[in-house]
Amino acid sequence: MYKITRAEKLADKIYLMDVVAPRVAKHCEPGQFIIVKLDEKGERIPLTICDYDREAGTITIVFQTIGASTEKMSYLKAGDSFRDFTGPLGCASEFVNEDIEELKGKKMLFVAGGVGAAPVYPQVKWLHEHGIEADVIVGAKTKDMLILEDEMKAVSGNYYPCTDDGSYGHAGMVTSKIEQLVNEEGKKYDVCVAIGPMIMMKFACLTTKKLGIPTIVSMNPIMVDGTGMCGACRLQVGNEIKFACVDGPEFDGHLVDFDQAMKRQQMYKSAEGRAMLKLQEGDTHHGGCGHCGGDE
């Protein structure tokens, strides 16, 4: 069992937890992820590592309630435990293995959308700890949906919040902020790292490709086993077939077929919806529709 030592609500439907997992904390690097399981029969849920404390042996995770399993997770409090907490999985961010002096000469831009701020944070923090200041753009629908602001400001060179409704920071999408920084403020970037919803990463990549900025994305498709065997996280990257769990999660964003990836994600939506309905209706959910399995 993996004990939860801290559980907080960061924003509407977004939660943060610190989990005691010494082995994972000892070996993880920025960019990697873990898979949690609530109980013996629970769903395996992949989550990017938001932060880690090797001395305390803890891993910080941030998640948004989307389906029944993440909804159940949101009920957990400090003192509760996960049945399984597997990791670190996936490959670390590429820059972790680069020469530090060469890395210091690069101008880096991170773009996060929504909960994508969680996996962006450990990467920017790692760079900050190695004397490298990166610019960070974080977008959300409203000011209240922005997360980890204080933490991000403490480790970034420049922090640019964006809100769709214009309630805070830059009024508009992260893509328009990228264009503003480059075209109006004369910023030059050697690489961009974009993490967030697939639709956001798609348009961020279209923007950076137009501006000539190489871009890395962190793909978060549906995963089951996290070892490359199930094939659920299959991606088309250029002329190659990749699996996010073992080949990624980071890929060249200008080569990822986002339309195909988003289409594959939609295949799982009906199952998630039925599971959430069954959880919400509890004992009153008789499954009479014949489609959700509640009558079996």
Image (spheres, rainbow, N blue to C red):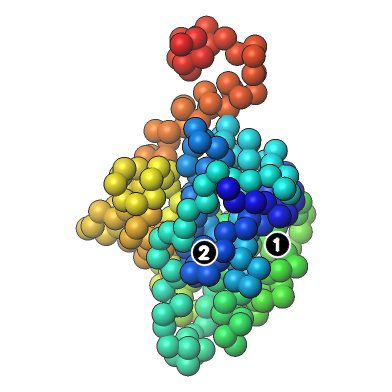
Q: Is residue 262 above or below residue 162?
A: above
Q: Is residue 174 above or below residue 70?
A: below
x and y, in percent, of residue 15 in the image: 68, 49
Q: Is residue 42 above or below residue 193?
A: above
* Residue furthest left in the image: 239
Residue for point 67% across, 51% down: 4
Which one is in front, 150 or 70?
70
x and y, in percent, of residue 96 in the image: 46, 77
Q: Earlier in the sequence, mark 1 or mark 2?
A: 2
* Lateral position of residue 225 relative to residue 143, left or right: left
Residue 235 appears in the rendering: no
- Mark 2, residue position: 23
Q: Residues within 10 Å of mark 1 (few under 14, many from 20)?
A: some
Which one is in front, 227 or 206?
227
- Mark 1, residue position: 148
Query: Does dot 1 land on a helix, a strand or a loop?
Result: loop
Query: Does dot 2 land on a helix, a strand or a loop?
Result: helix
x and y, in percent, of residue 6 in the image: 73, 54
* Lateral position of residue 200 relative to residue 230, left or right: right
Residue for point 71% across, 55% down: 5
Find the distance from the CA under tag 1 to the CA under tag 2. 25 Å
Residue type pointed to by label 2: Arg
Residue type pointed to by label 1: Leu
* Lateral position of residue 182 relative to residue 143, left or right: left
